[in-house]
Amino acid sequence: MDAAIDDGVDVLSMSLGGGFAPYPNDVIAIGAYRAMQRGIIVSCSAGNEGPESETLTNQAPWIMTVGASTTDRKILVTASLGNGEKIHGETAKGFHSIKKKKLVHPRSNLTGTTYCDTDFGIDDVRGKIVMCDGGGAKSRTEKAEAVKSAGGAAIILVNDESVGDTTMVGVYPLPAIQIGYTDGVKIQAYLNSTSKPKATIVFKGTVLGDNRAPVVAPFSSRGPNIASPGILKPDIIGPGVNILAAWPNSIFPNTTFYMVSGTSMSCPHLSGVAALLKSAHPDWSPAVIKSAIMTTADRTNRAGNPIENDKMQPAELFAIGSGHVNPTRANDPGLVYDISPDDYIPYLCGMNFTDKEVSVIVQRNVDCSEVNSIIDSQLNYPSFSIILGSTPQSYTRTVTNVGKANASFDVEIVSPDGVIVRVEPERLWFWESGEKLSYNVTFTRSAADGATKNGEGFIKWNSADHSVRSPISVVFV
């Protein structure tokens, strides 16, 4: 990181992470702070430990933390069952279509499982389409190789329940279709309904326009932010499933590109967007670039419905942060939330780090007794993450007009269930471009419902030309 900083880069893209560590012990956080001081935006992967909560890495507020989502592109394969039902899945490698053949779901004699990871039990898989469940000791590729070695005609690879319905493709040695857990249940029901199950497989190639996209990837790490609960993470999601990526020959000989899934794929997408914004707006700080990306993000999919998770349920803020990146809108955000390097010092002192620990992070001597410390939720961040009890909480945010002069913005509030959100003033009038104005937000609990642990909402500043949205996450205590 130091070498890149000294080389004068504009963006640092870091598809790596080491799990949770306090900032003074987190070398990425320390290096990213130094980069931010030099005007370099740092984009980092959120991690691949989802869908479990509190699995994020790279949680510091001066880092842009990126989760992963699907795209609207599928390399489509359709399995037609003997009862007429069609199951749609994906693959990374096309084959000739498979005419009607017997469909089997072998169960191991050794373990009693249907993973295809030990043996095929009493089933003779030769010349048949073999369904293998997700899980077990072997990878999907190893299962496909085992089926091919046993003479199988094709393989249907089913996600396990924890992965859900997002399909992550691979390259296999025989005709293969990767399907979601729900579709696997449908095939199992068909197998149970007949003594002579049959299926055909048709490879249809690349198809664009999946209306459910983007969907949050099941592996994408989730919040809340362990290091700093008052900072909502991840910040943003972007394309990270089935991405055609450069690939070293040392892993797969004679292969220079491969379909890869992970937040290591979504991170460089956001790094590219950040580079475009830096090129278009050279005077924008790292915090302004991140704010522009966050406040203009999409919250709906191509069908106009809320972005979903892999279980086909609306995704929560701890999965998507501000939403899915929209590069076009990010180039003209209207208002931005800026944070200077020194603005982080009151935040760090408020986290009760020692003077020495803060000095390690900011790389100069700091005496927190001389600093007006703030709690993390008070940082001028483009989102709100509130731990709310019976006492109302108030916070101040400052926005900068990066649009035209003589512009007015009116506030729109969608309060989380169980919370009253008040914003003062309700209108911001900017006479000049570059002008800064502040507003105050108060969060008050309206009802004590022991069954409700958290709520979500947003604050949006609307003008004739712009809509500037800040998500609100509330955890009740």
Image (cartoon, rainbow, N blue to C red):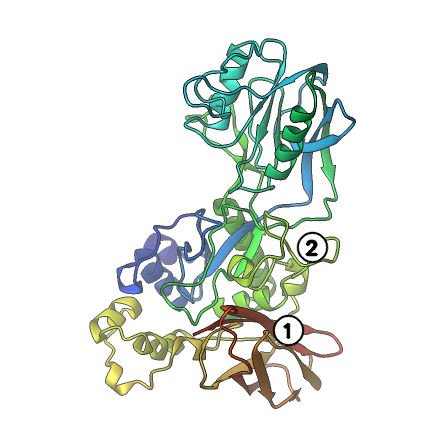
Q: Position of residue 352 (x, y in %)?
A: 27, 75
Tell me: residue 409, above or below residue 101: below
Please state, as top left, top right, bottom left or bottom right, where the C terminus lies in the image. bottom left
Instruction: Estimate how packed mark 2 is, as few (under 14), some (14 to 19) or many (20 or more) residues with alpha carbons within 10 Å.
Output: some
Looking at the image, which is closer to me, 79 or 17?
79
| Measured Cα–Cα span from mark 2 to mark 1 | 18 Å
The residue at the point 66 percent across, 29 percent down is: 187
Per the image, label 2 sits on a secondary structure element best described as loop
Residue 470 seen in this snapshot: no
Circle on res. 468 = 1
Tell me: residue 269, above or below residue 76: below
Circle on res. 421 = none
Name which residue type carries label 2. Asn
Query: What is the residue that sits farthest to the right in this orientation?
Result: 84
Number of numbered discs: 2
Residue 236 seen in this snapshot: yes
**Quadrant of the rendered structure where residue 95 is?**
top right
Going by the image, does 350 lie left or right of 234?
left
N-terminal label among 2 and 1: 2
Looking at the image, which is closer to me, 456 or 73?
456
Q: Position of residue 240 (x, y in %)?
A: 55, 45
Residue ID for mark 2: 301
Tell me: residue 409, above or below residue 131: below
**In contact (CB < 8 Å): disc 2 and disc 1:** no
Per the image, label 1 sits on a secondary structure element best described as strand
- Mark 2 vs mark 1: give the one in front: 2
Name which residue type carries label 1. Val
Q: Position of residue 259 (x, y in %)?
A: 56, 34
Going by the image, does 370 lie left or right of 225?
left
